[in-house]
């Protein structure tokens, strides 16, 4: 069978499972809709958290990013996994003990302020909509290549599927759907990696094959071979880094605290029964995420080596079918500048004839390596599972921010449970439509979606949550001022250095690197904005009134170690 038929079969089976789970786990109350009834096991929650976290960016884009960044791409691996250590140690157990449904709920109650809640809702909506637009576009790209439909049609199909199980099942449906999606995406990422590792190095474990010798009898290590191939084409060695130490540190820290501050990740720890289960969930999530994240560097090296050997200085007319398939998507482009019929893939921009989108590396990798058609189709199913799982989690954050934090807590406190559930489903429906619109008509900033989302989460949520847990005298004036200053500073820096808004537009961005503050890139500036948030919060706090005694007592209570709260499940 050809790739398209295999794709229809595997995607059809996986989608049927997701829809079946949504029907089985239909939410019947707001507690079911927001936190899955609070009764999810640590194992299931760990798998669901991993699926929620490993979006299209992790499955499709990350290995492709590392393929072209080489050593510098390690910051994403360190930052995105390190964030779960922070979550497990500093946030998850305490937030679970506080017992609220959402991050704005925690901030609104902890800082006894409608204004604080509103600022948190705005931050949650900005981060979530920014993130989800990229997921929907990822769904469209996968559909356009493997099901041979228009990208926009692919986005609409994805909208319908997500709408069904997110609106029907809420967090309960999403949680058990994400368990299935984790199984699909990790299997889809692992199988081709094992195949190619055996093919290139003879080692069936990709993480070890990454550091093994190639099995061509030369005795050369795979990384040395890739370094040589890169050097021949004028690129920097794959194992050499070009980023400054301070930028590496800032980016890693920003990604770590951004991870720990993302609302769709944090809300997962409200779904377990006990405080200790929240800590277990975070540890298991890190383990499940680590399986893919330790494999990603290997997949990057396999893909880049195979790509160079397949296309560099080869006749264009002899290119295999996968090349023309990806050309049709517009994500791979060849321009024969010197008319010799050969593909010149070189570092010199004037002579280079091949343009490759980072996002195709994982999806095209099995095709480049000439693996069986069912493996190629499996990767498509995995990419869709990754994008849809994160999209569903983000849509729930948007839905709960509107129905619970705005309507229930601020506009209409006397609304019935049934009415709140109806509004939650309606707001999820509207959110899906808006997300689909941005997927079909992506705004200019979608390329920077990850950096923007993580930077905003680091600059706004993380300090407010940390101080709210560990400093009982932190008041509403300090927290609100800190969040607003951190958010605005991050937005200003992103607009200035990522989009050139104040310096001549996008065309001028490349020339602004020398003007970065402290030599820190926009992707890493979230760490600076976070520090500013902390300082502003503490300074304002010093000159304003202490929080009420009852609030300080709540903070003392949530920091009490295991014992007092566990018997009651709080």
Image: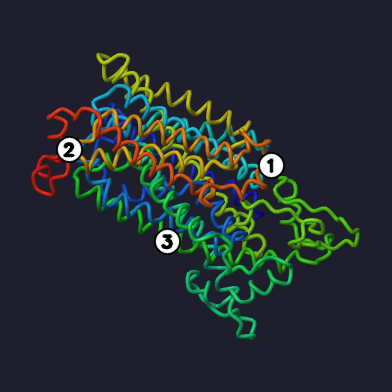
Q: Is residue 404 above or below residue 467?
A: above
Q: For residue 508, which numbered disc appears in the image?
A: 1
394 or 351, which lies in front?
Answer: 351
Residue 6 sits above or below residue 236 on the image? above
Q: Is residue 13 visible?
A: no
Seen as rendered, the residue at the extreme front is 543
Picture residue at 30% right of the left edge, 14% below the top: 412
Q: Quadrant of the C terminus?
A: top left
Give the residue at x 83% y 60%.
316
* Residue at the image position 23 percent from the left and 35 percent from the top: 474
| Residue nearer the viewer, 92 or 385 | 92
Q: Which residue is mark 3?
A: 291
State which quadrant residue 264 falls in.
top left
Q: Is residue 180 visible?
A: yes
Instruction: Name the one closer to the observer, 116 or 329.
Output: 116
Above-or-below relation of 400 to 79: above
Query: Does the CB distance between marks 1 and 2 fall below 8 Å?
Result: no
């Amino acid at each position: 069978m050809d790739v398209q038929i295999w794709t229809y079969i595997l995607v059809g089976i996986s989608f049927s499972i997701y829809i079946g789970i949504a029907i089985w786990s239909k939410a019947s109350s707001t507690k079911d809709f927001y936190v899955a009834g609070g009764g999810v096991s640590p194992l299931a929650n760990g798998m669901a958290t991993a699926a929620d976290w490993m979006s299209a960016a992790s499955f499709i884009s990350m290995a492709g990013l590392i393929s072209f960044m080489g050593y510098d791409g390690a910051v994403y691996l360190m930052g995105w996994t390190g964030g779960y250590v922070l979550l497990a140690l500093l946030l998850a157990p305490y937030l679970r003990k506080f017992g609220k449904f959402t991050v704005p709920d925690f901030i609104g109650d902890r800082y006894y302020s409608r204004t604080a809640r509103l600022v948190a809702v705005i931050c949650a909506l900005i981060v979530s909509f920014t993130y989800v637009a990229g997921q929907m576009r990822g769904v469209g790209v996968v559909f356009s290549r493997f099901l041979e439909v228009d990208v926009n049609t692919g986005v609409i199909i994805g909208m319908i599927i997500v709408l069904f199980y997110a609106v029907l099942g809420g967090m309960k449906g999403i949680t058990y759907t994400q368990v299935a999606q984790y199984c699909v995406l990790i299997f889809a990422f692992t199988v081709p990696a094992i195949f190619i590792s055996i093919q290139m190095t003879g080692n069936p474990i990709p993480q070890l094959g990454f550091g093994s010798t190639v099995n061509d009898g030369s005795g050369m290590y795979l990384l040395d071979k890739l370094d040589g191939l890169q050097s021949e084409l004028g690129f920097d060695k794959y194992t050499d880094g070009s980023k400054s130490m301070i930028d590496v540190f800032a980016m890693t820290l920003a990604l770590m605290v951004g991870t720990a501050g993302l609302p769709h990740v944090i809300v997962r720890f409200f779904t377990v029964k006990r405080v200790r289960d929240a800590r277990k969930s975070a540890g298991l999530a890190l383990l499940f995420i680590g399986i893919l994240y330790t494999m990603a560097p290997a997949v990057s090296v396999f893909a880049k080596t195979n790509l160079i050997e397949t296309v560099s200085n080869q006749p264009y007319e002899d290119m295999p079918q996968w090349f023309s398939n990806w050309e049709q998507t517009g994500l791979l482009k060849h321009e024969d500048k010197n008319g010799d019929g050969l593909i010149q893939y070189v570092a010199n921009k004037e002579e280079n004839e091949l343009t490759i989108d980072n996002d195709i590396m994982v999806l095209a990798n099995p095709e480049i390596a000439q693996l069986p058609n069912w493996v190629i189709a499996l990767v498509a199913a995995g990419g869709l599972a990754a994008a849809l799982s994160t999209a569903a989690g983000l849509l729930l954050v948007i839905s709960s921010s509107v129905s619970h934090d705005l309507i229930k807590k601020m506009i209409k406190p006397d609304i019935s449970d049934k009415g709140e559930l109806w509004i939650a489903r309606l707001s999820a429906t509207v959110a899906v439509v808006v997300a689909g619109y941005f997927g079909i008509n992506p705004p200019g900033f979608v390329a920077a979606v990850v950096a923007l989302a993580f930077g905003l989460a680091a600059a706004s949520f993380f300090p407010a949550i940390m101080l709210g847990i560990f400093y009982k005298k932190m008041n509403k004036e300090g927290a609100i001022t800190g969040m607003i200053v951190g958010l605005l500073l991050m937005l200003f820096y992103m607009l200035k250095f990522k989009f050139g808004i104040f310096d001549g537009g996008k065309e001028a961005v490349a020339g602004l690197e020398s003007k970065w503050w402290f030599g820190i890139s926009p992707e890493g500036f979230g760490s600076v904005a976070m520090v500013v948030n902390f300082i502003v919060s503490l300074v304002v706090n010093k000159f304003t009134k202490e929080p009420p005694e009852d609030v300080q007592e709540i903070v003392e209570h949530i920091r009490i170690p295991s014992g007092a709260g566990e018997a009651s499940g709080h």
